[in-house]
Amino acid sequence: MAIAPVKGTKDIYKDEALYHRYVSSFLRSTVELYGFKEIETPVLEHTEVFTHGTGESSDVVRKEMYTFEDKGSRSVTMRPEFTAGIVRSIVSNKWYATEDLPLKMYYHGPAFRYERPQLGRYRQFHQFGVEEIGLDSARADAEIVIMAIHSLSVLGFKNVKLKINSIGDAESRNNYKKALVEYFSSRIDEMCPDCKERLELNPLRILDCKVPADQEIAKGAPSMKDYLSEASEKRFYETLSIINDFGIEYEVDDGLVRGLDYYSEMVFEIHILSEEGKDYGAVCGGGHYGGLVKLLGGPDLPGVGYAMGVERVVSLMQDNHLLDDVKETTDVYVMPIGQDMLDDAFTLTMNVRSLGYSAETPMANMKMGAMFKKAEKRGCKIALILGEEELNSGVVQMKNLETQVQKTVALDDLEDVLNEELNPSSGCGCGCSCDGDCDCEGGECECGGKCCCSEEKN
Ligand code: HAM
């Protein structure tokens, strides 16, 4: 019986798993610069966390949730997004009362949506995201957008496109919804069954409809900007002006309303062009939310956040050649010459590992050629060849598999020589790539790294 993965899910192994780790570690370290701390919440939540939180009128809740009854007849749902679960955890743990506000949290993990799988769209995918809760500020909104752009630039992206909009406060949205109902009511018979429901539930959702004929009709709909209250307009322009001060280009997209119900005021999406011309959809989406904490049983605290689709980020990095040098490797392959050397090679391999380098050795006798092939397949940089003669003289043959240079190394010197081969330091000895002759005085170096040059020199 051949069992395929469930439609819309995939196995992530080896280089791809490394890409995910690489991306998430850069994203983590960037948001940590802004004071965000990690949170992990359960994949499973009571269904009402999402029906109340993410919102009954969103497609995600109406059509895409993996919801089932557990053995105790409770309805549970595998999270389709993180925000509602994070807010639930803040309310359940009363962190709004016991922790310093604003709470600044980041997360990374799988989310599940029963969507039609296509390029960049899966049923199980990973999000890396942030939520900042407890501070109502146009400046905090701007910082979140700046942090998202900063994170993507740290990964090496250059052509990012920021789309931003304001959907206003509750009063602005209510007035706008009334205008939309008036506009769409006369055309609703021509529109898809989903839009008929959306008109009842939340006419803003019609603006997200993917049916081309409906999109044509939506083009003539009233514009959100004409319904923004004075306060919302002022707040939005304050956010834009801070973003602008940091040289970040943006496009105000009046049709951007985002598909989840909790948003208010500023919303945004980031798109990136693939060098291969592929469109994976938005890599990042987020915005401000007003009533979510209260809706889930907490005090009236606002929040702002975003999530990035890690699979989309990885695909775009691959297409844009930003991962070409990232490879899953093993540092050292230890090669015993003959059956009798297996035990000593095993011991040497353990020693190499204790020095902090990854190492492998065959578990049974292998020919030299086969071991070199194996080392190449494992992406090893160094081969250590151990025969009886070497063992008796307390040495090993070390071959650098990239340069093909082979030398005899005393086992007592192994640590130093491996450090040099696998971790070459720069001229100044601090690990940055300057030539050791810069004037950075232990700060930001000419090569872009943090340097200890002058401390070394003094
Ligand atoms: P979202 O726009 O639904 O927002 O998802 C955020 C990102 O997750 C998208 O921009 C996309 O990159 C990725 N994504 C979504 N669905 C899929 C899928 N089926 N396959 C692959 N990637 C996908 C949220 O989830 C909000 N919780 C974001 C947020 C946080 N807003 C405020 N705080």
Image (tube, rainbow, N blue to C red):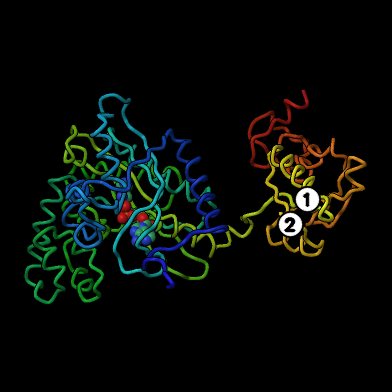
Q: Please report whichever mark, 2 or 1, sits nearer to the chain's N-terminal start.
A: 1
Pinpoint residue 123: horizontal percent, then vertical percent.
34, 62
| Left or right of residue 380, residue 85 in this image | left
Residue 96 image position (x, y, % from top left):
26, 29
What type is the residue that disc 2 sits on? Ala
Q: Is residue 102 above or below residue 168?
A: above
From this view, report whether residue 308 is shown above or below residue 203: above
Circle 2 packing at 10 Å, graded few (<14), some (14-19), many (20+), is few
Numbered tag placed on residue 249 in the rendering: none
Residue designated by label 2: 364
**Left or right placement of residue 248 versus residue 95 in this view:** right
Question: At 47% from the left edge and 42% from the top edge, which residue is drawn?
Answer: 28
Tell me if I can see residue 98 in this picture. Answer: yes
Quadrant location of the N terminus in the rendered image: bottom left
Residue 60's x, y, as percent?
A: 24, 58
In the image shown, does 28 or 243 lie closer to the viewer? 28
Q: Is residue 269 visible?
A: no
Disc 2/disc 1 C-alpha distance (Å): 7 Å
Q: Residue at x 92, y 48 (%)?
A: 389
Res 95 → quadrant:
top left
**Residue 363 drawn at (x, y percent):** 71, 54
In the picture, the disc for residue 342 is 1
At a point 18% along the width and 43% down the height, the residue shown is 230
**Total of numbered circles in the picture?**
2
Instruction: Please state which of residues 56 and 66 is positioned toward the viewer in this rendering.
Output: 66
Ligand 1, image quadrant it occupies: bottom left
Circles 2 and 1, Cβ within 8 Å, touching? The answer is yes
Q: Quadrant of residue 235?
A: top left
Residue type at tag 1: Leu
